[in-house]
Image (spheres, rainbow, N blue to C red):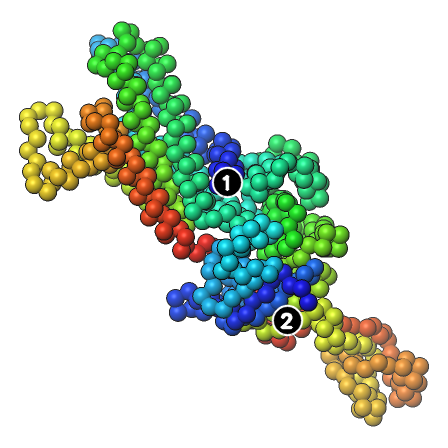
Amino acid sequence: MLKVLYADARMMLYQKGMRQVILAVSTYLVLYSILLKIIGHYMGFAVTADDIIMLYSSYAALAVTASTLFTSIGDFSDGCIRNKLILGSGRATVFVSAEIVGALQAVLISAAAFAESGILALVLTKGGLYTMTIAELADMWLIDTLALMSIGVFSTALVMVLGGKKSSYAIGLVISLAAHIFSLEVNEKLYPTAGKCVLSGAKLFLYRFYDRFVPYSYLKMRPHHETWVYLAGVCGLILLSTLAGILIFRKKEIA
Amino acid sequence: METVFECRGLEKKYGSFTALRDLNMEIPKGAIYGFVGKNGAGKTTLIRCLCGLQQPTGGSYELMGCSYRDAGIRRVRRRLGAVVESPAIYKDMTARSNLIQQCLLLGLPDFDCVDELLRLVGLSDTGKKKAGKFSLGMRQRLGLAVALCGDPDFVILDEPTNGLDPQGIIEIRELILKLNREKGITFLISSHILDELARMATHYGFIDQGHLVRQMSAEELRKECRKAVRMKVSDTGKMARIFDEKGIEYKILDDNRADVYAELIISEIAKDFEKAGCSILTMEEKEESLEAFYLSLLGGNGDA
């Protein structure tokens, strides 16, 4: 297991796909922050550190999904998954190793984005954080990173289960986009900016469950649940992806 | 006879489609086994089953004496190298990094074999060029080097000369022969280039519609391929009369050429032809090729 994991982690560092995603994330952060600063300057409002720091979380799931899709699909189409199996590596080993690499990608991309957004916030804003403390910021980054790791695991599992087909790109990104939109909807309905929450019955249960236990929703708001809720959501998605994924992948005919 | 691969009544079904049926095959240790069949005959399906990528739906096989159902099969597969369909390479890595990656996957203690393998397949001078920028031929060579990592006992190559230029084809052939001769590596080679296969293979397996139609050694094939003398004469009509009188089997190809299936005593034949007023223009020994044998065995529709 460890040698496959070590080889996979090494492969990840060479992957152009992940580097391109980090570059795209960085470029977007810089351009958006500068644009915000310019608009703020002319419109007469001050850009706060919070605005810049919260930016990455809004599209992080999409970035991590894209990176893991690039890596995992490439691994399949280049015959590298096949090669590992031919060499006698167990299917569960190959699967779990790929998932861990998916999680590692989420950590690397997020670390780069958090560091960059921190620097941009320091350079482009004055007065530091307005609506949160450093401890709250660290808490948010930790929860976001954990959520993104589980999303990385989920999207990698998706590619493995689908056998690395090109349709994995579409399915993975559609799921990520749908989750992004639904998370906005859940936030809007559960925590309306004006008035009270008017949901009831099954819909309220569904929205609350999504808000509490689906990691995609953690990226849309600052942490507001107890830590065990987040851990349960993250572990739940990882366990579900892994167990269901291995069951399918073990039976999968590899071309 | 010691075998590296042996299957009995192997069957593989995809739904209602039977890709392999009652397939019996043995690959002797130290052989270069040419695996020949039309597109869709089941060559790649068998290779996938052999490599553990797919499970047979019936029958059984043994790889280096270990049944595919045994837990030890994974350990046995470490002695296997394979290039199935396309070479398994990381496009964002250099040739050297790709080989190091394979060493890591195999758990080799060092990377000493990397330079030797690069030299062996002629990729020593690729430097920092990424494998994604390699030509098809270079990728094939790299795939072969990857398959050779860790000194495997058995190497499976699916179309190893695909995309190679004539010089590359010769080099790969020489390499396969050298590895077979010097290291005793057994090869299973599926190839569409029958002429090329005929220069290497010590054994052949002919597969059609998922069934192994014929399995034979190169020696047996040579015996089966009929030798003929191709003659170019001034008049094939007169030639036919001479051979009919002598009871010699022949086949007229056109007005001047014919294949004769017998050992001819040249001086006697020359006298007979002179008497009949027919000139012999040229004579050359001709052997029926693997291609011709393949066509007679499996028919001509579809590629090999």
Is residue B42 visible to the viewer in this orientation of the structure? yes
Q: Are marks 1 and 2 on the same chain?
A: no
Q: Is residue A115 above or below residue A17?
A: above
Give residue B174's mark: none
**Residue B241 horizontal side relative to residue B217, left or right:** right
Q: Is residue A163 above or below residue A119?
A: below
Quadrant in which residue A59 is drawn: top left
Element carrying mark 1: helix
Picture coordinates of residue B2, whole percent (x, y): 67, 64
Residue at 69% over, 51% down: B172
> What's the CA distance linking mark 1 and mark 2?
38 Å
Question: x, y percentage for residue A110?
Answer: 37, 26
Q: In x, y percent, where is residue B5?
A: 60, 62
**In this view, B285 is above or below B270:** above
Q: Residue at x 34, y 10 (%)?
A: A122
Q: Chain of mark 2?
A: B
Observer-nearest residue: B87 or B238?
A: B87
Residue annotated with mark 2: B215
Q: Amino acid at mark 1?
A: Val
Q: Which residue is mark 1?
A: A4
